[in-house]
Amino acid sequence: MSSSSPTDPKPAAGALDADTEAQLQRLLGKEPLAPAQPGNQSAASDPEQQRCGMVAIVGKPNVGKSTLLNALVGQKISITSRKAQTTRHRITGIRTRGDNQFVFVDTPGFQTRHGNALNKSLNKAVTGAVSDVQVVLFVVEAGSFSLADAKVLSLLPTDVPVLLVANKLDTVHRRSEIAPWLRDMQERHPFAEFVPMSAKNSRDVERLLDIVANYLPQQLWWHDEAELTDKSERFLASEIVREKLFRLTGDELPYTSTVVIDQFQEEPGKAAARMVRIAATIVVERDGHKAMVIGDKGERIKRIGTEARQELERLMDAKVFLELWVKVRSGWADDEARVRSFGYE
């Protein structure tokens, strides 16, 4: 497995490197933030100077991995929701910036509570994602470290640089506590870098890209400069419908609900350049869940369809016709064959 890392010496245990100390000073308001390096995607890249590598984004459920991936890529390619376990698959996002091409892999949050077939599939996606990467972004909530975080950390490889991404810094009210927390985190694992940030702050995102670029090996790009993901539009359609499903049902609907695309057909457009016809089935485990999804007089499923269609039209730059159905498949999450039939590894 190839890997590359900066030549700067790593800090001694218990002490933060000068860059991190300086960053903490800025976070505490003692020094203005320096502008991040601009990401120039339009200038032609010299093939001899190109760098490219895989970057795994890992962490427990609901720490902001998908939000971070979307920010790093510069466009939404992974769904987000307050509900844990929203991400079900390895989502690959591509960002080409200057001479650097980042191939990000967003993973499901590692599952420790239930051992059903679905969760085993999700955990397999996590461990598989870190098996052949150049750098790992271990995402935690700034100032926090739980048993679930520790479980994920224990799975990370020891021969690949791991960057501690302390996300959601904007939610930390007493930032003076971040420095001692970072020192404590350094004792838990020999992290290559410490990056306190907020995925919602564009300057933080650009700074993270600057840091990660140092770990990319010098090699030709794997993807075209304009590519943003290796996932198909059909896959993205199922993800967008599932995102709206979870957002509009809140905690009422169990996470085991999923979406299957039955039809994805592009047709000649009359009023638009592209027209896509999509038929999707929302799969739930109980009749009561089906009623939740449909809602009173069909209002909820109508809203799910409307919001999904509008977002798909923006993402695909096409006129979209979306038809939704709801079916009950009791116990599907415990059935390995059915889990695989629904597209899980």
Image (cartoon, rainbow, N blue to C red):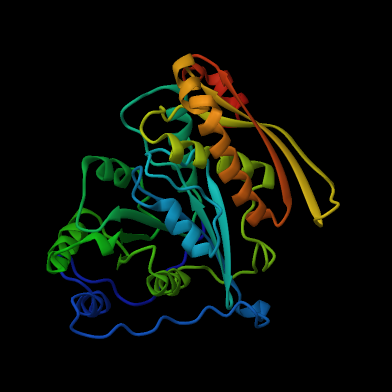
Q: Is residue 300 above or below residue 133?
A: above
Q: Residue at x 55, y 24 (%)?
A: 283
Vertical placement of residue 101 versus 8, above or below: above
Q: Position of residue 111 (x, y in %)?
A: 36, 34
Horizontal side of residue 216 vs 163, given as left or right: right
| Res 345 seen here | no
**Quadrant in the picture for residue 142:** bottom left
Q: Is residue 28 above or below residue 89?
A: below
Residue 263 placement (x, y as % from top left): 74, 33
Q: Relative to 266, is 6 on the left or the right?
A: left
Q: Quadrant of residue 225?
A: bottom right
For image coordinates 59% across by 51% down, the residue present is 311
Up the image or down, 40 lies above or below 144; here it is: below
Of residues 188 and 270, the one drawn nearer to the viewer in this rendering: 270
Q: In the figure, is residue 48 to the left or right of 1?
A: right
| In the foreground, 187 or 91 | 91
Q: Residue at x 50, y 42 (%)?
A: 243
| In the displayed structure image, the side of residue 112 where residue 71 appears, left or right | right
> Looking at the rendering, in which quadrant would you find the C terminus?
top right
Residue extending furthest toward the front: 297
Q: Is residue 254 among what the camera can see? A: yes
Indicate the position of residue 12 as horizontal and vertical percent values. Answer: 19, 69
Q: Nearer the viewer, residue 7 or 311?
A: 311
Number of marks in picture: 0
Residue name at image x 53 percent, y 32 percent = 299
Residue 39 point in image, percent of width and height = 53, 78
- Answer with the quarter of the image where residue 260 lies: top right
